[in-house]
Image: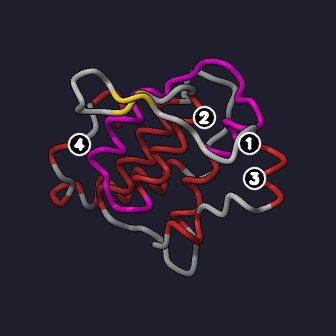
Amino acid sequence: LSAIMLFDRSSLTWQETVATPCYQYAVHPSGTFLQPPSLAAAMYLVAVLTSRRRYGLAMRYAEACHVDTRFTAEERFMFGMLERTLDSNCPDNDPDAHAVRLRMSHCILHSPNKCPWPVHVELAKYLSKISHVSASCRLSTEEVF
């Protein structure tokens, strides 16, 4: 997958939906991870890491994406960017990619937001490939059921 194709910040949709052309992340004092300044920034980071096949990191940052309220337009746009990893021309069917999308689906479970991909299909693919899912991307029993 090409991050350039997924994230065209010069597009009209991006400019109309996203308040700034980029996000500024603070580095934790330990120097070991970034601190997203907002939910939208965390979702963007998950989408970028997923597109770069850094699934383990994407899973960690997805933990910051739990929400129980309706998305803002910017958050909805960023969450929808993960759907682009399922582009019919080059879908990301890596077992760990299924795990990332399922974790993000779980993040919105208790909110009025809708998932842009069929969760049951992602779950079936995840379960059929579970022996190939890396340890850093394994979902908890709660996330699977």
Q: Residue furthest bottom?
A: 89
Q: Which residue is mark 2?
A: 40
Q: Amino acid at mark 1?
A: Val
Determine the image quadrant of residue 138.
Answer: top left
* Residue drawn at 80 percent across, 55 percent down: 13
- Cβ atoms at labels 2 and 4 below 8 Å apart: no
Q: Which residue is mark 1?
A: 18
Instruction: Please provide the residue range marked out in magenta.
Output: 51-78
The disc, 2 or 3, on the residue closer to the chain's N-terminal end is: 3
Question: What is the distance, in whole Å, between disc 1 and disc 3 at their CAs?
Answer: 6 Å
Q: Amino acid at mark 3?
A: Trp
Q: Nearer the viewer, mark 1 or mark 4?
A: 1
Residue 107 is left or right of residue 28, and the answer is right
- Cβ atoms at labels 1 and 3 below 8 Å apart: yes
Question: What is the distance, in whole Å, between disc 2 and disc 3 at their CAs?
Answer: 13 Å
Q: Which residue is mark 4?
A: 138
Q: Nearer the viewer, mark 2 or mark 4?
A: 2
Eyeballing the image, is 34 above or below 8?
above
41 or 137: nearer the viewer: 41
Asked whether 73 falls inside the magenta stretch, the response is yes
Q: Which residue is mark 3?
A: 14
> What secondary structure is found at the residue carrying circle 4?
loop
* Residue drawn at 38 percent across, 54 percent down: 98
Q: Amino acid at mark 4?
A: Arg
Q: Which mark is residue 49?
A: none
Question: What is the distance, in whole Å, between disc 1 and disc 4 at their CAs?
Answer: 32 Å
> What secondary structure is found at the residue carrying circle 1?
loop
